[in-house]
Image: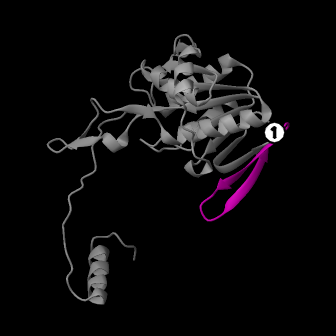
Amino acid sequence: MNIIVCAKQIVDVSEMKVDSSTNKPILKGVTQKISDIDKNAMEEAIKIKDKNGGKITVITVGPSDAKERIKELLAMGADEGIAVKSPENIDYHMTASLLAEAIKKIGSYDLILCGEASVDLFSGQIGPRLAGLLDIPQMTYAMSVNSEKDKISSERNMGDKVVKTESSYPVLITVTKEINEPRLPSLMQILGAANKPINEWTAESLNKNLTPLVETIDLKGVSMDRKNIVYKDELDDSINKLVDSLAKEGVLGG
């Protein structure tokens, strides 16, 4: 079985700070990593490969240093990596298009796995966009996956219910963080990842001259100012005052 895992390099949001004078996030020097839920997709790919055999290829679209992040997934168990250097001011349309062209260049595949969303922007667009461009079925928000020789099924988190869905191959599946616990590679696996191939492609080599459809005007942090109100009355009175205050602030629905 040929499995493709789509992964994204992001900044570690836990280390990101906001400049109090401009209210803009400080991105310089922040640690880069693979988006957490993409590691869940990688873990699920390894389990499917262990059951059915085959090959796992990881694809990322990002800056030139993104190939260093691919090594994390190669150490986990991927066989090969592809790093597509992204143009400036890339948007979801461009990212999905470049992923689609890279997958077409690979040729044969049975299964594409993605995280349900990246933990930095959490739009959840790439998986569905990619399935549409490739004209293949998709199963989103998968909490579990069961792969068989000629079909694959998943239990999907639809909010108030869980839906079991089945598909033939090829198919694209986006997974949730609850699906598994990504493994930590051993030192030998980390060292061995250096010998696995990482191909570097560009938009030009994929014959894609793209322009963004969305323009980012500005990026600002969320104000975290607190009112620091302390209620010192009896518990019931304090709860009532808190609820009234939250209602006046519009936090609670009517």
Is residue 1 within the magenta segment? Answer: no
Is residue 155 within the magenta segment? Answer: yes
Indicate the quadrant containing the N terminus: top left, top right, bottom left or bottom right.
Answer: top right
Q: Which residue is mark 1?
A: 168
The percent position of residue 249, horizontal first and vertical second, equals 27, 70
| Residue under the point 35% across and 32% down | 31
Q: Is residue 76 visible?
A: yes
* Image-based side of 138 in relation to 10, left or right: right
The percent position of residue 232, horizontal first and vertical second, equals 19, 82
**165 w.r.t. 245: above or below:** above
- Looking at the picture, tell me which residue is in the foreground, 84 or 125: 84
**228 w.r.t. 38: above or below:** below
The single residue placed furthest to the top in the displayed view is 205
The percent position of residue 245, horizontal first and vertical second, equals 26, 77
* Image-based side of 87 in relation to 25, left or right: right
- Looking at the picture, tell me which residue is in the foreground, 28 or 42: 42
* Image-based side of 17 in relation to 57, left or right: left
| Residue under the point 39% across and 22% down | 88
**How is the model colour-coded?**
one colour
**232 w.r.t. 228: above or below:** below
The percent position of residue 109, horizontal first and vertical second, equals 73, 26
Q: Quadrant of residue 78?
A: top right
The magenta span reads: 148-168
The number of numbered discs placed on residues in the rendered structure image is 1
Q: Amino acid at mark 1?
A: Ser
Q: Quadrant of residue 148?
A: top right
Determine whether the residue tagged by mark 1 lies in a helix, strand or loop. loop
Q: Quadrant of residue 50?
A: top right
The single residue placed furthest to the right in the displayed view is 150
Q: Is residue 136 visible?
A: no
Indicate the quadrant containing the C terminus: top left, top right, bottom left or bottom right.
Answer: bottom left
Neighbor class of circle 1 (other Cα within 10 Å; few <14, some 14-19, many 20+) is: some
